[in-house]
Structure formats: C-alpha cells, structure tokens
Image: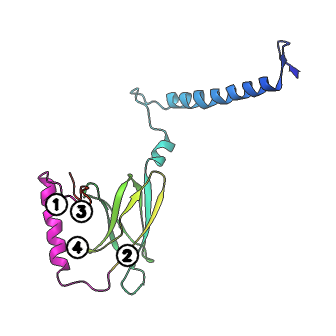
Amino acid sequence: MARTSRGAVMTRAGYQRAFAIGIIIVAVLVPAATARSQTSAGGRQAPHPAAAVASVGSITGTAWKTDTTRYALARLRLRNVDTGRSVARAQADADGVFRFVNVEPAPYVVELVTEHDRVLAVSDLFAVSPGRDVATIVRLSAKSPWYGGFFGNAAAAVISAASTLGVTARGSNGQPASAQ
C-alpha cells in the first residue's frame, strides 16, 4: 500500500483501476485530438494516413510463357470482375514480375494482353482485401483453339455492349457475371 498526494492509501486494486482508466483515456482522447488536428481549413476532416493504407490492397504476380519461362516486359491489365471494367495497367519487368498497388477491395483477374489490347491469357479469379498483398500468375496456354479468338472477342463485345444498355448477364451460380 502507498499513500497518494492527498494522503489517502491506495491498494493494488486501486493502482490497477487507475492504470486501466489511464489506458482508456489515452485510447479515446489521443485519437480524437489527432483527428481534430487533422481538419483542413474548410472544416472537413482529412483522412488519417493509416486508414488510407488499410483500405486498399496490392497485387504482385509473374507472367509466364508456354514453355515455363518468364514473360519479360509483358503487358498486363487488371479487370474488376464485379464491374467488368479495366481498372489498371502494368508492364512486367525483365523477370516477368508485375505489381498493381492501391487496389480497391473486390474480385479481380489479370489479363495478359498484346499492344493492341487483345487478350492472350487470363489469371485465376482472386479477391483483394484491405491491407493485403495478393500473389497471382498469368500463363500463356500451350496452344490456342481455332475458335478461341472468334468466340472470346465476340463474347467480350456482346457483354460490353449489353452492360452499357443495363443488361446483366448471370453466371451458372445465379450471380451477376457482368456489370449491372
């Protein structure tokens, strides 16, 4: 037991309560004071830097050729599967490694494209979560079927045109497969 500045006796339980109250005060008041100090001249609150980082994710991947060698300087496009829209582009380095940063949480695929935006290969479907780095690969297939270009491009054109008119395609699981 010890005496406080006012002469009262403080027990161990009293110290623990005082410590807990101190922690609560720091946890509640310090962030509130920091938020007040970050308001702009217009009175709007500026976003906390940690909040901005935690609300997006990133994607790191490797582009591969059919012969299991890395695809140097490959052109890549990131497509949001929910909206059907292309959201970012990247070019792989000399080792075939690419990266997309500041990506909003959603399901995505990475498309390996030509200089004229013709899709050569598509990655598996994956989801980006806030504050997480997702790893993926894109690999050219061993051989392309004779009908691949026709149906692939025709389907993309039909889906794109239909989505601009407000038509929604449904997948086999009943979920939307195109922009709504």
- Label 4 near label 3: C-beta < 8 Å? no
Amino acid residing under circle 1: Ser
Amino acid residing under circle 2: Leu
* Callout in the foreground (4, 2): 4
Q: Is residue 110 above or below residue 45?
A: below
Q: Earlier in the sequence, mark 3 or mark 1?
A: 1
* Callout in the foreground (2, 1): 1
Per the image, label 1 sits on a secondary structure element best described as helix
**In the image, what residue occupies the spot 37% across and 76% down?**
73
Q: Which of the numbered marks, if any, corresponds to residue 160?
A: 1
Q: Position of residue 145 (x, y in %)?
A: 22, 84
Q: Position of residue 11 (x, y in %)?
A: 83, 22
Q: Farthest front residue?
A: 173
Per the image, label 3 sits on a secondary structure element best described as loop
Amino acid residing under circle 4: Arg
Q: Position of residue 104 (x, y in %)?
A: 38, 52
- Apparent side of residue 3 relative to residue 133 in the rendered image (left or right): right
Amino acid residing under circle 3: Ser
Q: Position of residue 152 (x, y in %)?
A: 19, 73
Q: Earlier in the sequence, mark 2 or mark 3?
A: 2
Per the image, label 4 sits on a secondary structure element best described as loop
Q: Residues within 10 Å of mark 3 (few under 14, many from 20)?
A: few
Per the image, label 2 sits on a secondary structure element best described as loop
**In the image, what residue occupies the spot 23% across and 70% down?**
117
Q: Which of the numbered marks, if any, corresponds to residue 73?
A: 2
Q: Earlier in the sequence, mark 2 or mark 1?
A: 2
Q: CA–CA distance between discs 4 and 2?
A: 16 Å
Q: Which residues are magenta?
A: 141-170
- Apparent side of residue 99 relative to residue 10 in the rendered image (left or right): left
Q: Which of the numbered marks, if any, corresponds to residue 118?
A: 4
